[in-house]
Image: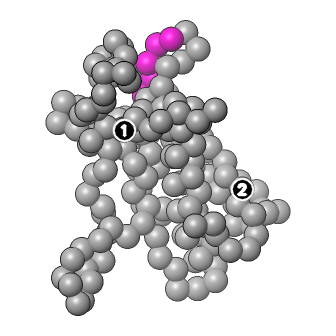
Amino acid sequence: MSHPALESAGAEIPSRRLHTDPLSGQSFPVSARAETDRSFITAIRADIGEAEAYKQALHRRGGIGLQRPLGVNVSGVDFITAARNPKGQMEIIVTDVKTRATPTSRFPSAKKTIPGTWSSEADQATSAARLRLNNPPSRRRSATPSLPDASVCANSTSITRPRGRARS
């Protein structure tokens, strides 16, 4: 089942890496780059995995996007969403996406506890300065304004991409 995406206006935070176009002078965020075959696997495919996992969290699971992926091989949480748990309570979900280099390789180990920096990122994502849902009345939920009081839980998502060219 697909849900319409609901995302905080503060979900897109300034990129940690930028590329400035030499002709226009405009700067664009860089989420991944590759100069070798190996780095294509560990950067580009991993970046696609993070983006697909984020879209799945929003559209298939009905999550609220609080912080978009910033790019692979960057320290910190991969992305942050909020969703109702089975008891109907809102939870802030910090996600660590794991991808494999090849279809036969093992997935990297997931974090067993939430690092302090991830908790700090979750606090920032739910702060009054960034949590701006601007959702239409048909999508409003009474529990949404209480996100800063929601519990924080970790999620590790493993993504396997098929061999060959990436989908666009």
Q: Give the position of the N terminus as an image quadrant.
A: top right
Q: Give the position of the C terminus as an image quadrant.
A: bottom right
Q: Position of residue 50 (x, y in %)?
A: 53, 54
Task: State the residue at coordinates (64%, 83%).
Answer: 37
- Residue topped by disc 2: 160
Snapshot quadrant of residue 138: top left
The amino acid at mark 2 is: Thr
Choose the circle earlier in sequence order: 1 or 2: 1
Task: Report the predominant secondary structure element of the magenta stretch.
Answer: strand
The amino acid at mark 1 is: Glu
Q: Position of residue 110 (x, y in %)?
A: 61, 44
Answer left or right for 19 relative to 78. Answer: left
Q: Position of residue 131 (x, y in %)?
A: 25, 33
Snapshot quadrant of residue 19: bottom left
Q: Is residue 91 magenta?
A: yes
Task: State the residue at coordinates (37%, 70%).
Answer: 30
Residue 155 lies, with reference to residue 39, above or below; the image says above
Residue 17 marker: none
